Image: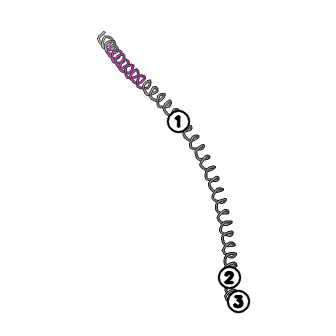
Amino acid sequence: QSELMSVNKRLQTSKKSNTKLQKEIEEQTSGAQDKKSKLNDTIKALKSVLVTAETNLEKSDAKLSKVRDESNSCKGQLKSAFQKLDEMMEYIVKMQEENDEVVASLESDLEKVIKMKHDA
């Protein structure tokens, strides 16, 4: 009988221990499920942020491409304007040289007229 009581006592102790372990397992399982749920929410949020970042990057790339195109267009216009300015400067220099020649010729003619008038 004492052996039976000893076995019974051990069984009760084992049952309490098993019950305690079962509760701990349930608590840990519940905690793990909460963490899993939170991680899934975090993953969803990060995916959303990533999609937004990708969209913003695509928009930025499109804007950059447009700005590059506009810049290239402006460079072409500027190059053309400088070329026309060079042509105008060449024309002005040529006209200045022609005017200098005309002025020199007129001065020479004037000197001749004054000399002829003086001699007369």
Seen at 35% across and 20% down, the residue is 97
* Mark-to-mark CA distance, 3 and 2: 18 Å
Q: Position of residue 90 (x, y in %)?
A: 38, 22
Q: Position of residue 99 (x, y in %)?
A: 38, 18
Q: Quadrant of the N terminus?
A: bottom right
Seen at 50% across and 34% down, the residue is 71
The residue sitting at the left extreme is: 119
Magenta segment's dominant SS is helix
Seen at 65% across and 68% down, the residue is 28
Q: Quadrant of the C terminus?
A: top left
Task: Please report whichever mark, 1 or 3, sits nearer to the chain's N-terminal start.
Answer: 3
Color style of the picture? one colour
Towards the viewer: 75 or 85: 75
> Which residue in the protein does label 1 denote?
65
The residue sitting at the bottom extreme is: 2
Instruction: Identify which amino acid the numbered label 1 is placed on.
Output: Ser
* Mark-to-mark CA distance, 2 and 1: 76 Å
Task: Determine the secondary structure under disc 3.
Answer: loop
Instruction: Identify which amino acid the numbered label 2 is placed on.
Output: Thr
Task: Please report whichever mark, 2 or 1, sits nearer to the chain's N-terminal start.
Answer: 2
Instruction: Identify which amino acid the numbered label 3 is placed on.
Output: Gln
Crowding around mark 1 (Cα neighbors within 10 Å: few <14, some 14 to 19, many 20+) is few
> Which residue in the protein does label 2 denote?
13
Towards the viewer: 63 or 33: 33
Q: Residue 77 colored magenta?
A: no
Instruction: Give the magenta-colored segment's residue range.
Output: 85-108
CB under 8 Å between callouts 2 and 1? Answer: no
Task: Please report whichever mark, 3 or 2, sits nearer to the chain's N-terminal start.
Answer: 3
> Which residue in the protein does label 3 denote?
1
Q: Of the numbered discs in the image, which one, if any, rests on residue 83?
A: none
